[in-house]
Each structure stands twice: as C-alpha cells, then as structure tokens.
Amino acid sequence: MNTSTISPLSMPAGAPAAARTVLKLLERLRHGTLNVQLPDGSTRQFGARANAHPVATLRLHNWRACAAALRSGDIGFAESYIAGDWSTPDMVTLLGMLLRNRADVEDVIYGSWVGRLLYRAKHLLHRNTRHNSRKNIHAHYDLGNAFYELWLDDSMNYSSAWFNGNPDQPLRQAQDAKVRRTLRMAGVQAGDRVLEIGCGWGALAEMAGTEFQAGVTGVTLSTEQLAFAGQRLQRHGVQAQLRLQDYRDIGVTDDEAPFDAICSIEMVEAVGREYWPIYFESLHRLLKPGGRACVQSIVIDDDLFERYIASTDFIQQYIFPGGCLPCPREFRRAAAAAGLEVVDEFNFGADYAETLRRWRDKFLRARQQVLALGFDEKFLRTWEFYLCSCEAAFTVGNVDVMQFTLRKP
C-alpha cells in the first residue's frame, strides 16, 4: 500500500496542471524515499514506506521542471537542471532512485510522444555517415585536451577501468589493468601487428608497444586526440602508425590487412545502430584467419533495448550525438552475422560506476579550472548531469560494460 504523504487534498495551492500531474505520478514510487521541496518551501515525501532507503531529495526552485519532464522526459528534466530550475544535494542517489522506479514513473522518464518525436528527429540528423561521424566526434572529443586532463587520470583513459575486486586502488592502476586485459584477450604477442579502432589519447598503443612489443596502427576521428597520442608515443619511443581515418576506410586504400589482433575500447557505441553491420564486417575483413578482436562496449539491458532505440535520451542529444548502445543480444547477433565467433564475455559494470564516481569527484573539484578554459556554468551543469546519470545507471544496472572477445575462424 502506498503511504505517501501527498494526496489530492494536499496539492499545493497555485500549482500548475503539469506539477499536479507529476506529483500524482510520484505517488507511485515503490523503491526508496523521495523528499520534494516545493517552490513555496513546503516539503512532500513520496515512497511506499517512510524513510525507506535510498533517500533522495529534489528541490524545485520553480514549477518549470514538471512541464519539461512531462514534455520531454529525461531530456526535459536534464535541461531544467541545466537552466537552474531544480537542485539536489546528491544527484547520483536522486537519479538512481528514479531509475529504480522507472516502470512506475515512465511518463516522466520518457516524456510525451510529441516531445519524443522532436528529439528523435534531431537525433536522426546526427546519423553516422562519414561526414557526420567527424562532426559527432569533434563535438565531444575535440573540446580540448586540457579539459580532459583536468579530470581523467594521467593515463588519459576515457573508458571504464577494471578494479578486479579492489575498488580502493588508484584509478591509474585499474585503467592499466583494463588495457592489459584487452591486449591479452586479443591474444597480442611480441611482433604482432595490432589495429586499434578508436585509439583515443594513445594509452593502449603505448602499452602494446612498451609491454607487449607489438606494432600498432591506430585510427581516430579526433584531431585533438591524434596530436596528443602522437606526442605521447614519441616521448616513450613507441613506433606506431596513428592517423585520422574512418574505420570504414581501413584497408581500402592501403594493403595493411589482415592484422593479427584488433582492439576497440568503447568505440562501437559511437558507430550508430545502422552501421553495426559495417563495423563488424570491418573487424572480420581486417583480421587474419584465427585472429582475435577484443571489443569493450557499454551495453543496455536486453529487456530495455527496444524502448531505448524507439526514442532518444539526454546523452544522445547533448553528449554523444549519433551514438547508440547495443544490448548483449544484438552485439552477439551482429558479430555472428559478420562471421565472427564470440569466444569470451566479461562484464564489470560495478567498476564503471566506481570509475565514474572518481571522474565526477575530480570534475567537480576542477570547476574553476574548467571555467578558466572558457566554458560556462551551463556547460558545467550539463557535464555534471551526464557523469551523474551514467554513474546512477551503472549502479542500478540499467547498463553494463562488457569486453567481448571475437575470433575470426
């Protein structure tokens, strides 16, 4: 039985229709407790049991967030935070509690069909053609190396670390462990020719050259990353070929294929669903027979996938234009269709929650440095919401991170 303190008789005077609708929806909460401070200063408590954990707080500075959430779901809710319409002392707990109750408040999470349609249309404009891929990557990764250096660890790994059961270890150590596992699962040996699709700032290429004595060809669409990675490898004496190139063009204008091994860490999410067949066909085409590829990917739960692809979300609109998360089922299907065998699967979503917690903490402590780089408060609030929403999703389990090891027969 719902014992929420809100009732039709206790609706705040002067609350607009959208606010009344949202408050009624919140009466459905079954997991945890939500304390909502209304614009007039009064407080309402929602939840199946008083003070059930987790306990989250939402402070509404005005009623605009309610209309935004009803109209555009999580995108509208995020936009209203960026605009300063609401606040919370613990964003991760708040967003996690809403995700745990998603079945009960889906009208707010997903928004109206009109709002979803408008954002879906905008998302489709970012589909990853060769031209759009460069624009989409530039929008996120070319914010400047100085920005990412403020809150990533010194290995400059912008993907989940692997703590291997020891969450107290330094982030750099856990990131090195992730990269090392990737190379090992790909079967990299001394003298091998390794292809990295999405080489980032060069962490894997450095380890492949120094620790595994392998030769690396790496591709990226980020000019900022390419410049940083090239200087990094030069400092460490690593001979590698890094270039600004679309993965679809590798081996088309040169004779480098096949490679002994391929590594691709959290790049497939940026490919876009309609291009997954081309991505996996590229892996097959570029691998020698018997060669392995280790692909690390964020994945969404199989049961949530159809709803996810039918709409769009805050991250696709504001952080990763053109992106789409696979689910494990679709990943396996696309790999098999390209003639690749999945020989190992490894999931470590709790490690991503910890990685994001470290990033968030460091990012928030670097607020003044971020502003000094020329970014504004809205940018800061956008990225805070992004990091917190990802941490909440991994904590709750809506999303996971997996390493898939693929083999070309």
Image (tube, rainbow, N blue to C red):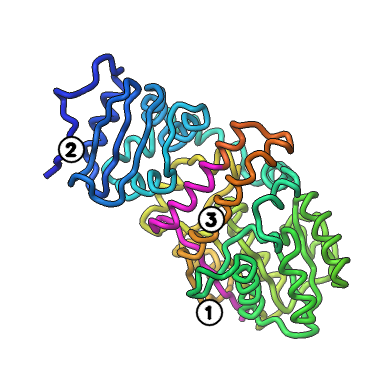
The residue positioned 66% from the left and 60% from the top of the image is: 153
Query: Does the magenta run of residues contain 3?
Result: no
Foreground of the two, 186 or 331: 186
Residue 133: x percent and y percent? 69, 46
Please tell me whether mark 3 or mark 1 is closer to you in this view. 3
Q: Quadrant of the C terminus?
A: bottom right
Residue 193 position within the rendered picture, expressed as x and y whole percent measured from the top left: 78, 77
Q: Residue furthest left?
A: 1
In the rendered structure, which segment of residues is drawn in magenta?
Answer: 384-409
Question: Pointer 1: residues within 10 angstroms few (<14), some, or many (20+)?
Answer: few
Q: Amino acid at mark 3?
A: Leu
**Residue shown at the point (77%, 64%) measured from the top left:** 218
Crowd tier of the residue under label 2, counting other residues whose Cα lies within 10 Å: few below 14, some 14–19, many 20 or above? many
Q: Where on the picture, by quarter, is residue 267?
A: bottom right
Residue at the farthest top position: 14
- The residue that mark 1 highlights is 343
Residue occupying image coordinates x 64% and y 60%:
279
Between discs 1 and 2, the one toward the N terminus: 2
Instruction: From the viewer's perspective, tell me whether residue 339 is left or right of residue 67.
Output: right
Question: Disc 1 marks which amino acid?
Answer: Val
* Amino acid at dot 2: Ser
Q: Which residue is mark 2?
A: 4
Separation of disc 2 and disc 3 at Cα? 33 Å
Rendering coords of residue 239 (x, y %): 87, 72
Helix, strand or loop at label 2? It is loop
